[in-house]
Image (cartoon, helix red, strand yellow):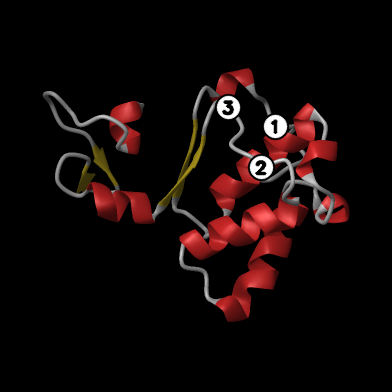
Amino acid sequence: MKVLLGVHPPTHGEAFIFGLSVRDDLSAIQEVMGCCPQDDVLWTELTARDHLELYARFKGTPEAGLRTAVDTVLASVALLEDADQPVRNFSGGMKRRLSVGIAMIGTPQIIFLVRSSDYRVPGRYIL
């Protein structure tokens, strides 16, 4: 998994994602992927909306469409009503859903849910 994400370079062999080589085209792959790590990478003083806006900007979401993109993801992970609450007030499940939302921002073509079998998102949320 770490080779596919670009954390470690491949030592031998080859892997392709959408026809792109992990060895030779990693930057292009990373432009179209989202990743939800095993551990939540969240700042307690920021809100869910703050997190998603930050990551949307990292992913190159135009300012004109930022609010819509963020609200769409917030609704998808059932955090729209709590969007402006500091993450320190979130339950563990809410934090996990926010992490999934961060992976979804920027409409990636593929999302890696690292150790996703440990964290099941209820079926009512469409990923």
Residue lying farthest to the bottom in this orientation: 64
Nearer mark to the viewer, of 3 and 2: 2
The residue carrying mark 3 is 39
Mark 1 burial class by Cα count in 10 Å: few <14, some 14-19, many 20+: some
The residue carrying mark 1 is 121
> Where is residue 53 drawn, in percent x and y?
63, 61
Location of the N terminus (image quadrant): top left
Front residue (pair 120, 55): 55
The residue carrying mark 2 is 43
Q: Kindly report the distance in space between the C-alpha atoms of the residues bearing marks 1 and 3.
A: 15 Å
| Left or right: 2 in relation to 24 | right
Q: Residue at x 68, y 45 (%)?
A: 126
Q: Secondary structure at mark 3?
A: loop
Q: Earlier in the sequence, mark 1 or mark 3?
A: 3
Residue lying farthest to the left in this orientation: 12
| Left or right: 76 in relation to 59 | right
Location of the C terminus (image quadrant): top right
Quick check: 31 above or below 17? below
Q: Residue at x 75, y 51 (%)?
A: 47
